[in-house]
Image: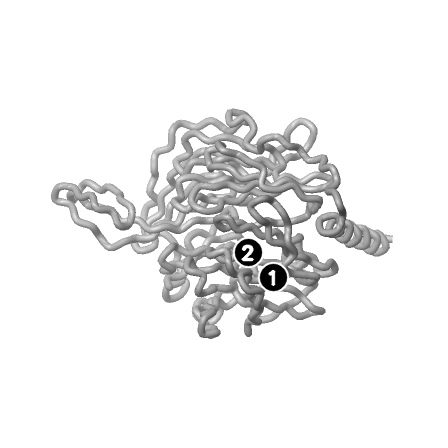
Amino acid sequence: MKRLFVIIASIIVVLGIGVAVYFVFFASAAPHLTVSTANPFGDTGSGTVTPTTPSTPEQVAGSAGTVVAPNLIKITGSAVAAGAVAFDIVPIFASATSTSLAPTGATSTVANGTFSSPDIEVRYIERQSGNVYAYRAQARSLTRISNKTLPGIQEASWLPNGSLSFVRFLAQVAGGEHLNTYALPADGNGGYFLQSDLDQVSVTGSSTLFTLTAGTNGSIGTVAHSDGSGARTLFTSPLASIIVQAVGNSFVAVTKAASEIDGYAFSITSTGSFTPILGPLRGLTALLSPSGNLLLYSYTDGNRVYMSILNLTNGSVTTLPLATLTEKCVWTSDSAFLYCGIPTNFSGNLPDDWFQGATSFTDRIWRIDLANRLATLVVDPVKTGKTAIDAVNLTLDPNTQLLVFRNKKDSSLWAFSL
């Protein structure tokens, strides 16, 4: 009976996607959407957070992190929220007892002060407490910079300078469980709630926020400044089960991946119209490049996984010699290279089993040079550190000196010096 129910449910989902695609591209008029048209930022003073006194940075004693292998550091063994940010900083030492901070490239000086070598700061959120931590790669130091309590944070989307993150967590309220989104300043002071039960919240560019609200008959995509001002509707669509990626003015929507359902990808214009660019492909996932011109995508065919790059300018496709899920990759800032966690072998019904935690991978980290079509092994954590890593949520600093990722096996945070 259970198997029959699953089969029937799958057929309904497939038919639903087919009907949605028909309405997007062939129907003369779009159906009326029943999703809320309210500003997703809502009342920025609403919601509650456990009150705390203003945060004071608290440095953790001793060298931070554990050296597992040359250049490979386990920053923390405790579970962290999905999503970290890495950026460059330069300490300025005014005296033997005084220290201040300036961004890379700063021209200001202080009396008797000198610039040290640039460092890279990684900011992340501890899942259990919601506290914000800052790890410095060269100094091997760890500082808790916020003690605001937001337990159970699942994911965070950061501004590139690490000053603000949009965190997501489940909350029990009257009437049931809801997915909350909170704008959390890194120092913990201030902050505000967004609309509850948003399907997606992601930062694009230096200070723009994209939100997706889905309903029974479709979805609405909204963009705004990170402080909630200037909100405007980007699109309305009868497609509800989508993931949207944004880079500058480039937006791509991909239907949520499943092994038994055909997936599609669409480019979204500034006026909100959808144009199909990929599909049908089973298990389709995608990752838009920082330039907005290239789309890395992976899909499944039987028990095999394939990975290619679609040039959105001329429509050409480049098949890559290595394969993984795009959730295990990150682009360099110039869109010239990819760093990916490549499993030593695949198992299970993909990508479903991996998303649901029913299967796990053991990865090697590879660097892919797109211009020369060259793949280079960066590190094999099992061989060099006797540690199995299922890499996810990969991120790079702007100068591609530090690769940061989360181990999906235990949600610990890692870094590799490139």
The residue to which callout 2 is attached is: 408
Between 188 and 243, the one lying in front of the other is 243
- Mark 1 = which residue? 360
Identify the amino acid type marked 1. Answer: Ser
**Dot 2, crowdedness within 10 Å: few (<14), some or many (≥20)?**
some
In the image, taking residue 254 as reference, residue 25 lies left or right, namely right
Q: Identify the secondary structure beneath mark 1.
A: loop
Q: Residues within 10 Å of mark 1 (few under 14, many from 20)?
A: some
Q: Is residue 14 above or below residue 165?
A: below
- Percent x, y of residue 218: 70, 42
- Res 55 quadrant in image: top left
Instruction: Report if residue 390 is visible in the image.
Output: no
Which residue occupies 75% across, 40% down?
A: 31
225, above or below 5, in the image: above
Disc with the residue nearer the chain's start (1 vs 2): 1
Asked which quadrant contains residue 108, the reply is: top left
Amino acid, disc 2: Lys
Image point (71%, 49%), residue name: 24
Determine whether label 1 and label 2 are within 8 Å by CB.
Answer: yes
Q: Which mark is residue 387?
A: none
Residue drawn 50% across and 64% down?
340
Q: Nearer the viewer, residue 198 or 347?
A: 198
Viewer-nearest residue: 69 or 261 = 261
